[in-house]
Structure formats: structure tokens, C-alpha cells
Image (cartoon, helix red, strand yellow):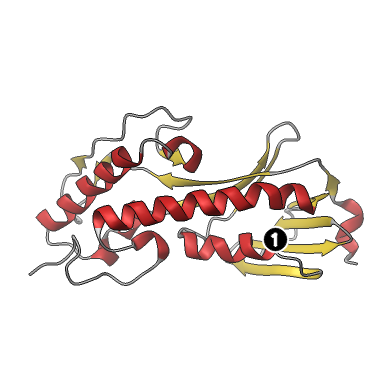
Amino acid sequence: MEPWFAGARPIDSLEPEIAFRLWDEFHPAPHHQPEPLALPEFPRASRLQARTTEVIGHQAELAAYYGRVTALARQHAMKLHQVRQYFRMDLRLDNDEADIHLSFPWYDTFSAMDHFLAAVAGNDQGMVYDDQDQGWAVEAWAFDGTLYIRQSNPDSDDEPGQAVALPRAGLQARIAPLRERTAKLMAYLAKELGPDVWLGGEVQSAGPFDQR
């Protein structure tokens, strides 16, 4: 048992969600004026984010938005690595009632996020996940049906971070449909647009970024 477990805030649950980041401008290159980028019109809580639950039933609209991104990239002879920011995603674990909001700022593809989700969804005991990057760290431990998650800043002694304790089964029950839903959306977008940039795959030569 880790010392910080004693101070972890007990909560009933966390709601995991993945969102697609949206842009209303396309920036072709330095010293060039940005160009307007039409956003999808389906309802969503945040103008510049589309949660997976909001996208269901509107996959074609989201694919059309990314189609506009790829068309602008081709128009300006840009390669995929130059426009990856337009395909980034966000993972969050929230409990609005308890004002708990855990974020993963260094994970911007589903493949990166799924390492954490799969670890929590599994049955291992003890430390099930541990990762850190600049100014951010997350660790997850499981003991006797309880999940302990802490997010902190390893570069600062002045930021206490957030630590929570919750029933593991409840979060697992929410993670399973999220992973399934997101995987289906990724497959749809890959089919419609070619290179599966959301899964971190390599660009196929016949994809929309092909410059031949």
C-alpha cells in the first residue's frame, strides 16, 4: 500500500470519455494567413470537441470534417506529420459532482490512451499502470476491488495533484463500451479517409496525403 492511499478521496465512480479535438481554422504554414475550417454541425457540449457519445449517429459529418482537413493539406502540399494536430484526441475521467477531473495531456491518439484503459479494465492487482511526462504523471493501483488513481506533477513539490479511490468494477463497466465505441469510430474514419492517423498507423501510399 502506498502512503498516498490514505489521503485518496473516496468517490462512487468516474466517467471515462474520449473526444476528438476540432479546429475552426487551418494553418497552412508560417507566414500564411489561416483559412476557415467548417466545423461539424451536430450537437455537442463543446464547440471544439466532439465526444464519442456525441459522434454516434453523426459519423459521416465527422468524416466530412476530416475530409476538409485532408483536402486543405493536399492543397498546400503538406505531409501527415505537418498536420497531425488536427487529428488529436483527448481522454478524460470525470466526476462532475465531486469536481474530480483527471486528464491525460500527453495522450493524443487512441492507441496511447488504450494502454491505460486496458490496464484498468484488466484483472491485475497491485500497480496496474504508471506513466509520466513533462509536468504530468499518473499511476493506478488495484486492491480487493478498489482502484486508486493519482494524477500529479512530478516536477513540482507545490502541486498536491489529485488522488481518488473508487470501485474498480464500476469504472470497468464504463470503459468497456467506451473502447468498443471508439474502436468502431476509428474503423469508420479509416475506411472513409484512408490512413488511420487516429490509431497511430503509418500513412498508406494511396491515402489522402499521397502527393503523387
Quarter of the image where one finds residue 131: bottom right
Mark 1 lies on residue:
120
Residue at x 44%, y 30% (from the top left corner): 44
Q: Position of residue 15 (x, y in %)?
A: 65, 42
The amino acid marked with disc number 1 is Val
- Vertical relation: 51 (above or below) 201: above
Circle 1 residues within 10 Å: few <14, some 14–19, many ≥20: many
In the rendered structure, the answer to whether residue 34 lies left or right of residue 24 reads left
Q: Is residue 89 visible?
A: yes
Residue at x 58%, y 55% (from the top left corner): 104
Residue at x 46%, y 32% (from the top left corner): 46
Q: Position of residue 170 (x, y in %)?
A: 75, 47
Q: Position of residue 186 (x, y in %)?
A: 40, 55
In the rendered structure, the answer to whether residue 126 lies left or right of residue 75 reads right
- Vertical relation: 211 (above or below) 27: below
In the rendered structure, the answer to whether residue 11 lies left or right of residue 107 reads right
Task: Find numbered disc 1 in the image and state the secondary structure of the residue it sits on.
Answer: helix
> In this orientation, which residue lies closer to the viewer: 152 or 70?
70
For the C terminus, the quadrant is bottom left
In the rendered structure, the answer to whether residue 73 lies left or right of residue 84 reads left
> In this orientation, which residue lies closer to the viewer: 135 or 13?
13
Residue at x 81%, y 63% (from the top left corner): 142
Q: Is residue 31 visible?
A: no
- Vertical relation: 100 (above or below) 146: above
> In this orientation, which residue lies closer to the viewer: 137 or 174?
174
Quarter of the image where one finds residue 14: top right
> In this orientation, which residue lies closer to the viewer: 72 or 201?
201
Quarter of the image where one finds residue 43: top left
Which residue extends farthest left?
A: 212
Q: Position of residue 12 (x, y in %)?
A: 80, 40
> How many numbered callouts?
1
For the N terminus, the quadrant is bottom right
